Image (spheres, rainbow, N blue to C red):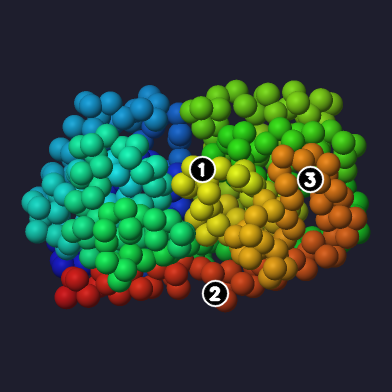
Amino acid sequence: MSGRSILFLQATEPGAYPPIMNAAFCLADRGWQVTLLAAPMTDLPTGVPAHPGVTVRSIRARPSHVFGPADYGRYHMAAAHLALALRPAVVYASDPLAASPALLAARLASAKIVYHEHDSPMPGRLRPWLAARRRSVARRSIAVVLPNAARAEIVGGELALPPGQVHTVWNVPRLAELPAPRQRDASGEGPLVLYYHGSITPDRLPESLAGALASLGGLVSLRIVGYEAPSARGYVEQFRAHAGTAGDLVDFRGTVARDRAMAEAAAADVGLALVPPETDEINMENMAGASNKAFDYMAAGLPLLVTDRPDWRGLVVDPGYGMAVDPRDAGRVAEAVRVLAADRGRARTMGEAARRRIALEWHYERAFAPVVEIIEGAAR
């Protein structure tokens, strides 16, 4: 392989992580030969779209999200084999479980490392051996990437990283992912379609939303694309039951490929990007910028309903791209939805402004450019 070869290790299904695919495609578009080593799950049948510069290799599929010792050993062996066969210039590791195989692969190939942490562990919660490898891979990296500035500061401090080593890259879409603009009906006829895609949990689709649907009397419907998190099996049916007769207006379409999810968003009217107003969980507390779904909805031309928090107000509400609600309060959620349903021209204007911001500024090609520069400098 040439010096412009890069091996992505993420110990998961990369098709479920838009920033992994976006980073890979951005590099492939610049002439890099990209290999992704996947650890797929049989209950998460996503995939990586075809690209002439991207090759996906896989270990055998796991029956669940649990990564047992045997599967983890297979992943290490596959990473080592690819490192020796491809001799990549850079190993791109994602999240703590990828730290150990990335250190092995980089040593075998004499490669540089980039560490991109999508989901940060709570300080002190990792097993000691995994925490040590996470610390090692981060400190050896030519760049450490986090999707949120507050998290970048927390992780940089926790791992004692110099400020110039840590980079914030929001989970925005690539320009190539923007769906074609859709002419939305401003007449107010037909139900307003609320839309959600991603992992399904009570935190992100709260039962108060089901209560709001029940109170709106057929004014709106809800379309859900995604998968129930392991801790929330059966939650969609629970949600429907909580909505009463309005449960018939909940359309659950399951897991689909990312391009299909973006098309589904473009066919809806309002995007839902709700998080708990108060939490001590590091990722949920610092989700503004890290939530790809918010930017996906914007790319699709949707106005957003977000949680009434300062970070989300600054990102979405103040620039005029959506409205803020307390997701625990069914009445406030219903009130905001009524406003958007009654003035669809206003909703359309919000969505169009959001889409312009994505097209002009908030896209992965631009956000990821500083990291690309570091990677390409390391390969010279």
Looking at the image, do the residues carrying marks 3 and 1 touch, with CB atoms under 8 Å apart? no
Q: Earlier in the sequence, mark 3 or mark 1?
A: 1
- Residue 280 circle label: 1
Q: Which residue position is annotated with label 2? A: 361
Q: Earlier in the sequence, mark 2 or mark 1?
A: 1
| Amino acid beneath label 2 | Glu
Say whether residue 267 is visible.
no
Badge 1 marks a residue whose secondary structure is loop
Position of the N terminus, as image quadrant, is: bottom left
Q: Residue at x 43, y 56 (%)?
A: 151
Disc 2 vs disc 1: which is toward the camera?
1
| Amino acid beneath label 1 | Asp
Look at the picture and state if 235 lies above or below 128: above
- Residue 333 circle label: 3
* Residue 36 falls left or right of residue 173: left
* Residue 201 falls left or right of residue 188: left
